[in-house]
Image (cartoon, helix red, strand yellow):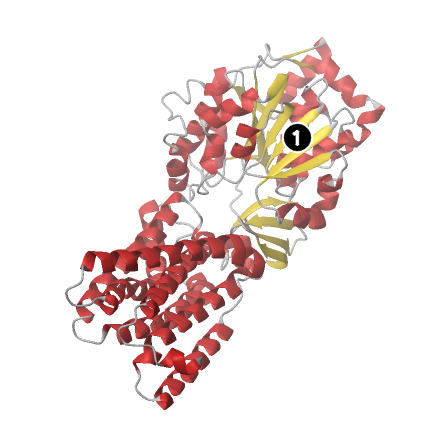
Amino acid sequence: MRQMFFRISAESRWPVYAMIALSGATALGAEVVWTRLLSMLLLGTVYVFSIILAVFLMGLAIGSVAGSRLMRRVNPRKALGWCQLCLVLGIAWTAYAIVHSLPRWSDDVLTTHNVWRMYWLDLKRSFWAIFPATLFWGASFPLACASAAKREEDSGKIAGRIYAANTLGGVVGALCVSLLLIPWIGSQQTQRVLLMAAAASGLLGITYTLRTGAARALATVSSLVVAALLAWSLSPVPGDLIAFGRRMGVNAGSSKTLYKAEGRNSSVAISRWNNGAIYVSVNGHVEATTEPYDMRLQRMVGHLPALLHPDAQSVLGIGFGAGVSAGTFTLYRNVQKITICEIEPVIPPASTRFFGAEDYDVALNPRTHIVFDDARHYLFTTQEKFDIIASDPLDVFIKGTAALYSKEYFETVKRHLNPGGMFTLYVPLYETDETTIKSELATFFEVFPNATVWANLRQGAGYDMVLMGQMEPLEVNLDEVLQRLDRPDYAAVRQSLRNVDFNSAFDMLATYIGSAADLKPWIQGAQINTDGNLRLSYLAGWGINSEVADHIYRQMLAHRHLPVTIFFGSTDHLKTFLAELQSLPAAVDDSEDPD
């Protein structure tokens, strides 16, 4: 069998097709892995994805030109084999650069307000890490065409076959890496597989061009030894990279990674900070924590609609996260069914393990049903309606998340609300700018013209907020809310609110900062985010280094009118509520934000 392999005719084409197919598989497979890792390190905005793709395509183009010139001067089959062997070095370099080199670059990418500079730095990082390998993938195609060509034969037919083999290999590589290898063995082992595949492709190209068996044996053994050593040297993906992404270096030594996992759609890390707080991060960005200000926001997403709805029985939670928002509904005995839509299967068990006390083990509750699906797909396909829909998705600047803030998506949510139903949506004020917030509000108000906005402060300064929409104008009977909260069966609800410094219903309701009607003049002219433009993807990605959270909060607060048409009740209750509503806390310096 071995002798037959080494006696392949120089005219045989199948080794060329095999090599170019393996080249396509390693190219797109590596692109999947590296895009995933770099998007964690650089933050996964549409701009970062575009930068990575541009660098990849540029490298392929330059490599292709170089390969076209090289094939006239050397044996193209031998050059193709050596090109594949050089990919072993290229893959190893990129794996090293992402884990060990890029996180240690010293620049002001974390603090600069110059967005052009920030993305210029991301472009330099991408070139440094992935450009060398792309040159060899680019050179492989013309070398393969030259290797398979024969005199007086249709060159178009040969190029088409080479292209077909390369494309087929690329499709298989991308699918296997994204759907099978990463969730099965992780990024480190996947890169090792790609590295060894490149070595096999290179050996296939050079061994049968060597004349003696000794030369073939020496080339095979030495290449395999080098490839094996390089594969062994690849480091695992650090927990800090998954947890903090571009802030990996800044946060070094501030926390300990308790758990990390790479799922089919997302990578997840659980960290314990030196102050004892637990953080859950997805793809390099903190999504939920046990910090008091985060716990208050997560509980607000659930408690606001659950306490104001007179008899909610069915709930849909969009995004599991730490499970805290969904967990609040387990405290309401009238809620009979809690459906949670989560796209990444590794998140619920991880969060249940580390946030069980905070989320009331919602994933284990018999009323809970977890659907592993994209939220848009689930809502577009299910016929079920809900009394409450609570959404706590990824931040809008993450590529793809803007689809969960579009007008069409909000209209779909609205169609799945029962009469009297309520929809709450978490919106951060940090890592964003005024243009982005106005677009988010304008889009939400376009579908829910009776919507209201509720603020979550951090040490008296604006930090994030909850949007709440319903089909009818909101009416809050303070007497009924207080009576309901005083009932014995609401004891757990009262305790849950006290845990986040809401010592009364007034404390939570006083977070109200305005209605759609109040804020209409402020958002005048804001861009509406639709499925056709997904403008928020670009607006949000442009404002991630802004530090104007409290400024935006004050701007909205300045437009608030006393909500006498929304809140009503006995004179004493209404007077107490309005007095608390008008007590504006002073803003403070909150620059020391670890996340």
Residue type indicated by callout 1: Gly
Residue depicted at 31% across the width and 75% down the height: 82
Q: Nearer the viewer, residue 203 or 195?
A: 203
Nearest the camera: 313 or 202? 202
Image quadrant in which you'd find residue 494: top right
2 in relation to 395, above or below: below
Q: Quadrant of the N terminus?
A: bottom left
Q: Is residue 381 above or below residue 203?
A: above
**What's the residue at 20%, 76% (across, down)?**
74
Residue for point 67% across, 35% down: 326
User: Left or right of 77: which side holds 174?
Assistant: right
Residue 202 place in picture, x, y as percent:
36, 73
> Residue 348's x, y, as percent?
66, 45
Can you see residue 458?
yes
On screen, residue 67 versus residue 35, left or right, reads left
On the image, which quarter does residue 407 sit in? Answer: top left
Foreground pick, 317 / 595: 317
Q: Position of residue 466 (x, y in %)?
A: 57, 29
Above or below 442: residue 210:
below
Q: Position of residue 225 (x, y in %)?
A: 45, 81
Q: Which residue is nearer to you in this view: 93 or 151? A: 151
Please identify the residue farthest to the left as the structure is shown: 152
Tell me, yes or no, if residue 557 can be seen here. Answer: no
Instruction: Say left or right for 46 vs 566.
Output: left
Circle 1 packing at 10 Å, graded few (<14), some (14-19), many (20+), is: many
Please give the residue where the numbered disc 1 appears in the rendered image: 302
Query: Relative to 78, is 34 above or below?
Result: above
